Image (tube, rainbow, N blue to C red):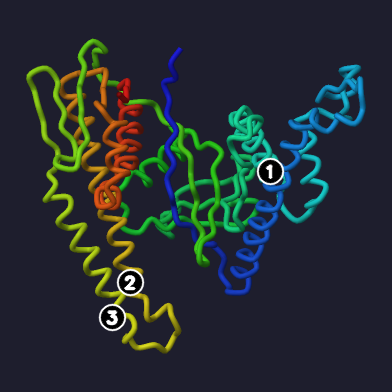
Amino acid sequence: MEKTTLKLTRKIQLLIDLSTKEEKKEALDKLYQWQNRCFRAANLIVTHLYVQEMIREFFYLSEGKKYKLADEKKDEQGILNRSRINTTYRVVSDRFKGEIPTNILSNLNQALISSFKKNRPEYWNGERSLKNFRRDMAFPFDLEGMSGLHYNEEKKAFCFRLFRIPFKTYLGKDFTDKRTLLERVVEGKTKLCTSHIKLKEGKIFLLAVFEIEKENHDLRPEIIAEASLSLEYPIVVKVGKARLTIGTKEEFLYRRLAIQSAHRRAKIGATYSKSGKGIKRKLKAVDRLGQTERKYVHHRLHVYSRRLIDFCVKHRAGTLILLNQEEKTEIAKEEGFVLRNWSYCDLMTKIEYKAKKAGLELIID
């Protein structure tokens, strides 16, 4: 049976809700310590999982040796003194005891085991290398580590405690659905699933995962919408006799190429910029324009994909087919200009997510 729910991830900035600088610094140092231990634990877990999976290759020195990756108390051929899932958890919990909440290690262990099982055939055939985790990775937690989520009228923010550290949200000029989703969580109408904390340049971000109900539209699977993605027209969609062209080459590229030109001029001019605080000050304009291009593309692709799905819903199309995408992707890879300036994969990802949310079946031809 098809699931009626969908998981959404939203990035929300957090502030440590303590009064003094010393207390805030102590809490932030603790978060960075947890991040470091999580990074080390993740690499350890993946290494042990791989060794366990490949252990049959290590028995070539001993003939007739039988083994099974199971608890020896439950299976005669078992070579483990506990369950397989518990082995990796015990490795990291024993090593980092008292340095990081066990809730984080437990969620990390479950996520990595699930990911490892999914990619196991490729590991076995030597077609994929093991994951290697960065020091700035986000660390997971579930609702057991989070308590007291509520909206504080005085602070005009959502407040909660994460492993006894008080936080409040900073939404700023929020034009998305973050506030609405948090309100629904407080009211008990939406479920908050296992989420992550991300630390970046001294800032704290909550990568909150919400489980929501899919949109309920009166769609008919036999009505098919055919869409084509290209550089001339970002999206052309047809349902029966109805046809819609979404965006144009000039409309999309004009602004993007203008931003790129400004970015190049800023790079040249950075050589003669006033210093004073080192390279960060000299490259301030360069960094700002780089972010401007990313934000512009991100916004335009969201608009295009939203209009596509709205058109399908309007005409009650339950099936959406993207035509000739493999061929166009190969052409884009061969042409540097197209590959640099037209985000096929990003647009397809956004279409896939919105189609799933609206209840459309997506077929990529």
The residue wearing badge 3 is: 269
Q: Position of residue 7 (x, y in %)?
A: 45, 33
3D distance between C-alphas at marks 2 and 3: 9 Å
3D distance between C-alphas at marks 1 and 2: 41 Å
Circles 1 and 2: CB atoms closer than 8 Å: no
Residue type (three-letter) at the residue carrying disc 1: Asn
The residue wearing badge 1 is: 103
Residue type (three-letter) at the residue carrying disc 3: Gly
For the point 28% across and 62% down, which residue is it?
292
Mark 2 nearby-residue class (10 Å; few <14, some 14–19, many ≥20): many
Give the mark, 2 or 3, whose residue is nearer the N terminus.
Answer: 3
For the point 31% across and 28% down, which residue is it?
355
For the point 9% across and 26% down, which residue is it?
243
Q: Position of residue 283 (x, y in %)?
A: 37, 76
Give the mark, 3 or 1, whose residue is nearer the N terminus.
Answer: 1
Mark 1 nearby-residue class (10 Å; few <14, some 14–19, many ≥20): some
Q: Nearer the viewer, mark 3 or mark 1?
A: 3
Horizontal relation, residue 118 to residue 299: left or right:
right
The residue wearing badge 2 is: 286
For the point 79% across and 31% down, which residue is it?
57
Horizontal relation, residue 123 to residue 230: left or right:
right
Q: Nearer the viewer, mark 2 or mark 3?
A: 3
Q: Position of residue 146 (x, y in %)?
A: 59, 45
Instruction: Decide which of 210, 111 is in the foreground and name it.
Output: 111
Q: Position of residue 333 (x, y in %)?
A: 32, 44
Residue type (three-letter) at the residue carrying disc 2: Val
Q: Quadrant of residue 195?
A: top right
